[in-house]
Amino acid sequence: SQTIHQWPATLVQPVGSPLSLECTVEGTSNPNLYWYRQAAGRGLQLLFYSVGIGQISSEVPQNLSASRPQDRQFILSSKKLLLSDSGFYLCAWSLGLANYEQYFGPGTRLTVT
Amino acid sequence: GIQVEQSPPDLILQEGANSTLRCNFSDSVNNLQWFHQNPWGQLINLFYIPSGTKQNGRLSATTVATERYSLLYISSSQTTDSGVYFCAVEDRGSTLGRLYFGRGTQLTVWP
């Protein structure tokens, strides 16, 4: 069966510091991968999606970037964190784009101080 | 993008009660999913239901795609059902797989 991992689980970082969050998927090949952010107030927003190694699409202009160095690895990064980057970051995977069920990882809770 | 509205925003129940959560969406959809977010933040897949009716134990869901709404039924609620329930949809014209989430229903079940 497929599993999705994220780390770290929690992170407290000062403003202006760099960020690297990692997501890995096991038990499937060539998944579509997604990064979402959940801010206070519940709603989730899609940040990035990827259909393959090195293929990243951004949905929201922001202080963040994403990379996919391996088939089942998805990384969210920032060179300099802002206070507004605080939130709960969730990685998800699906077998294809459009009309496929998405499955979410356990998330990383980021607090920027 | 497609608009997703969930109601009620908050629901407080006593253990054993039944409840109905509603999700309205503004356009035709490819995909509709219901999730339960547990206290640790994990999103648990409940149903993948772009149309029709499904049941899983005490939970069932119905989506009427032509009328652009979905309902999640919880019967004989338990304290472990507490958490936030999200509806998420993918619009029919999408080729991205982007899910649009509602703001959720916060369910609290008291013993």
Image (tube, rainbow, N blue to C red):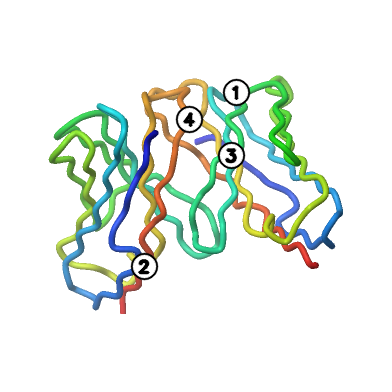
* Mark pair 1, 3: CA separation: 11 Å
Looking at the rendering, in which quadrant would you find the C terminus of chain B?
bottom right
Decide: is B30 above or below A74: above
Amino acid found under the numbered disc labelled 1: Ser
Q: Which numbered marker is on residue A101?
A: 4
Q: Where is residue B107 in the image (x, y as percent from the top left)?
A: 71, 58
Q: Are marks 3 and 2 on the same chain?
A: no
**Lower sequence index among marks 1 and 3:** 3
* Mark pair 1, 4: CA separation: 17 Å
Q: Position of residue A90 (x, y in %)?
A: 39, 51
Depth check, mark 3 against mark 4: the one in front is 4
Depth check, mark 2 against mark 4: the one in front is 4
Q: Do labels 2 and 1 share a chain?
A: no
Q: Which of B87 and A83 is in front in this view?
A: B87
Q: Mark 2 points at which residue?
A: A86
Secondary structure under badge 4? loop
Amino acid found under the numbered disc labelled 2: Ser
Please report contact status of discs 3 and 4: CB closer than 8 Å, yes or no: no
Q: Mark 3 points at which residue?
A: B3
Q: Position of residue B39 (x, y in %)?
A: 56, 63
Amino acid found under the numbered disc labelled 4: Glu
Amino acid found under the numbered disc labelled 3: Gln
